[in-house]
Image (spheres, helix red, strand yellow):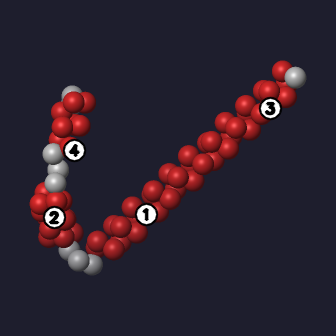
């Protein structure tokens, strides 16, 4: 897919489209599955954020080690 097409696609999504998408998800998964899906999504986002934070910490540590080695 073209990057411009993807950006155009996401810029054109408004409130009616979001409501329609939510209704389709509700019909497809049912009311009972949605909390489980959101819980799983939340765990995935949390895990991703922890991974990014760990990576930032590791990079800062390595930069500090390099600066001390050059001193």
Quarter of the picture containing the C terminus is top right
Q: Earlier in the sequence, mark 3 or mark 4?
A: 4
The kind of secondary structure element at disc 1 is: helix
Percent position (x, y) of residue 59?
Answer: 67, 36
Percent position (x, y) of residue 54?
Answer: 63, 47
- Quarter of the image for residue 24 reads bottom left
Which residue corresponds to the image point at 85% horizontal and 28% vertical from the top-left?
A: 68
Q: Which mark is on residue 19?
A: 2
Residue under label 4, please give it. 10
How far apart are the alpha carbons under marks 2 and 3?
51 Å
Q: Earlier in the sequence, mark 2 or mark 3?
A: 2
Tag 1–tag 3 contact (CB < 8 Å): no
Q: Residue furthest right?
A: 71
How far apart are the alpha carbons under marks 2 and 1?
21 Å
- Which is closer to the viewer, label 4 or label 1? 4
Residue under label 3, please give it. 65
């Amino acid at each position: 897919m073209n990057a411009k097409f993807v950006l155009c696609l996401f810029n054109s999504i408004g409130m009616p489209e979001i409501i329609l998408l939510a209704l389709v998800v509700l019909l497809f998964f049912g009311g009972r599955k949605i909390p489980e899906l959101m819980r799983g999504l939340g765990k995935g986002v949390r895990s991703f954020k922890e991974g990014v934070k760990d990576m930032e910490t590791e990079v800062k540590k390595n930069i500090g080690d390099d600066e001390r080695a050059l001193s």
